[in-house]
Image (cartoon, grey):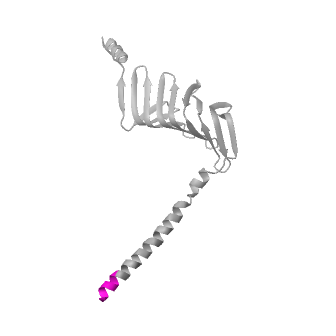
Amino acid sequence: MPKPFVTVVVIFLLGLAIGLVVNQQRATQSQQPAPEQQAAKAEPDVVAEDLELVQGSDGKELWRIRAKSAEYSLDQRIVSVIRPQLSAYIGTEREEVFIKSDLGEINQSGNTVTLRDNIAGRYGDFALTSDVFDYIGAMKKAYFKGRVIVTRPDFTVNATTVEINLETRELTAAGGVAAELSPASLNSLKKEKK
């Protein structure tokens, strides 16, 4: 046999052997769940039905969450809730903001709430739907993300993100923002001009 042919065969066999070793290592790694997956599958330390959590400060209730069921892990210090209903009270008038969803997580020590899936809420004349809601108590801000729709009797706003400053009550929309005035609001503008 010619020497170049033997060299090609040896290189081919070495490549094949290295490929088999790499595939075997990848298969072994993919069978073992990642540490975060192992933590997510860990059994909760506390399970509760018909739960109510209340967060307050300076003798005032900041928010209250009721949920169909909840799980709490001592390691993660987060309460995972199913079918949560959040009532938050803002401003000196203590106006109620109500939001419900399918799933959520509450971190009472961090004063944060994240709700996901089928979010629907209301505040005064405003109604809102989105995919994700994040409340960050330390910043006094709420964020709605995903397919966000904010409606009021006289207009509708669509966006991918809406930020609400709970102190100033300023609403900022971003990402594909579209606003639509209702015919009734346009008629009132016409009357004001006359």
How far across and down, in percent of the image, does residue 108 sit? 64, 41
Question: What is the quadrant of the C terminus in the image?
Answer: top left
Indicate whether 139 appears above or below 94.
below
**Viewer-proximal residue, 150 or 38?**
38
**Viewer-proximal residue, 1 or 178?**
1
Q: Residue at x 51, y 29 (%)?
A: 120
Does 3 lie within the magenta span?
A: yes
**Which residue is at the far front?**
1
How far across and down, in percent of the image, does residue 168 sit? 50, 31
Q: Residue at x 54, y 30 (%)?
A: 99
8 vs 18, left or right, is: left
Q: How many marks?
A: 0
In the image, the segment drawn in magenta is 1-8
**Viewer-proximal residue, 39 or 61?**
39
The answer to which quarter of the image holds residue 58 is top right
Which SS does the magenta portion mostly show?
helix
How far across and down, in percent of the image, does residue 141 sit? 52, 37
Q: Residue at x 36, y 14 (%)?
A: 188
**Residue 128 visible here:** yes
Does 6 lie within the magenta span?
A: yes
How far across and down, in percent of the image, does residue 62 sit? 62, 32
The answer to which quarter of the image holds residue 104 is top right
Indicate whether 89 appears above or below 134.
above
Indicate whether 26 appears above or below 185.
below
Question: What is the quadrant of the N terminus in the image?
Answer: bottom left
**Residue 137 visible here:** no
